[in-house]
Each structure stands twice: as C-alpha cells, then as structure tokens.
Image: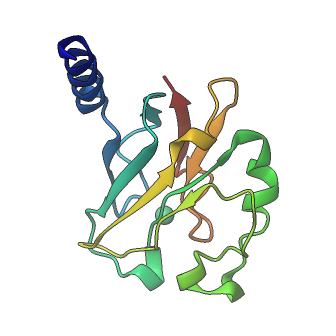
Amino acid sequence: MRYLFCLISTTLSFNLYAACSLELTANDNMRFDTRKIEVDSSCDQFTINFKHTGEIAAEWAGHNVVIIESGNYSKVVSSIDPKLGLTSGYLPEMPEVIAKTAIIGGGAETNVTFNATKLSKNQKYTFFCSFPGHFGQMMGNVEIK
Ligand code: CO
C-alpha cells in the first residue's frame, strides 16, 4: 500500500512538471513570438493561451492559432476564404484542423485546449494564423517531445 502511494505520487508530480500549456503572443507586425511550439508527449490535453499584443482590430489584422499536420498545410491555407467570415477563422469546417482559437484583435486574449494524444511523435505539425494573407509569415512548427 505504501509502495502504491509512492508510485501514485511520483506519477502525479511527473505530470505536474510536464508543461501542458503555453503562452503565445502575436503582434501588429504579423508575427508570433515563437516559431516553435513544443508539446510534451505525456500531456493528454494541451492548452494554448493566446494574446494579441498589438492594437489593430480583429476585422483588420486579427490573429488566431490553427494547428494542422504539416502535410495538410497547402490544402488548408488554400481553403482560407474571406467570405467565410471572422468567426469561422475564414476556414470551412474541415477534419484537417486539429485545433483553432478564435480570431482576436489587439489587446484581446483567447485560448484553446485540444486532445494532445491525437498528436504523434512521428508526424510533423504546423501552427499558423488563418487571417487572410497572414499564413505565409505567421507560421511555425509544433513538435511532440
Ligand atoms: Co494573423
């Protein structure tokens, strides 16, 4: 029983040390503050807390965070359509989208929590902003560690 308790405590403290969330920002210059997001493979859920540190309104130069398999990048970014509107992230409903935050304007914050067990170490992932015209500059890699 004592052994079991120790085992449970060890497991719990291990999970506490694994960072299953990330603070990410973007600015009025259409840049994320990092080109790489690392997701610990021990995380079941992973949360991205996302903040737009600029001042421009969401309608003019909002930002979001979308995560996809890198192999689907061309397909997904070619689906970006201004007619689909801001609340959809200018994207249709598509299974390729693993996670997507709302599009936010300067000074706003949002977050998304996704099932990290769906991500594989053997797969490459990309995060990007799906505001029309932003994906070329606002993108980076998601790595499972
Ligand atoms: Co953007």
- Residue 105, by quadrant, is bottom left
112 w.r.t. 138: above or below: below
Residue 26 visible somewhere in the drawing: no
Q: Which residue is painted at 78% across and 48% down in the image?
A: 72
- Residue 108, by quadrant, is bottom left
Residue sitting at the far front: 1
Q: Which residue is painted at 35% across and 64% down in the image?
A: 28
Camera-nearest residue between 60 and 129: 129
Residue 129, given in percent of the width and then of the height, sits at: 54, 60
- Give the mark count: 0
Residue 128 relative to residue 64: left or right:
right
Camera-nearest residue between 91 and 46: 46
Residue 29 relative to residue 138: left or right:
left
Residue 111, given in percent of the width and then of the height, sits at: 36, 63
Residue 66, given in percent of the width and then of the height, sits at: 56, 57
116 w.r.t. 145: above or below: below
Q: Which residue is painted at 62% across and 71% down in the image?
A: 132
Residue 69 visible somewhere in the drawing: yes
Q: Which residue is painted at 62% across and 52% down in the image?
A: 136
**The N terminus - image quarter:** top left
Residue 116 relative to residue 77: left or right:
left
Q: How is the image coloured?
A: rainbow
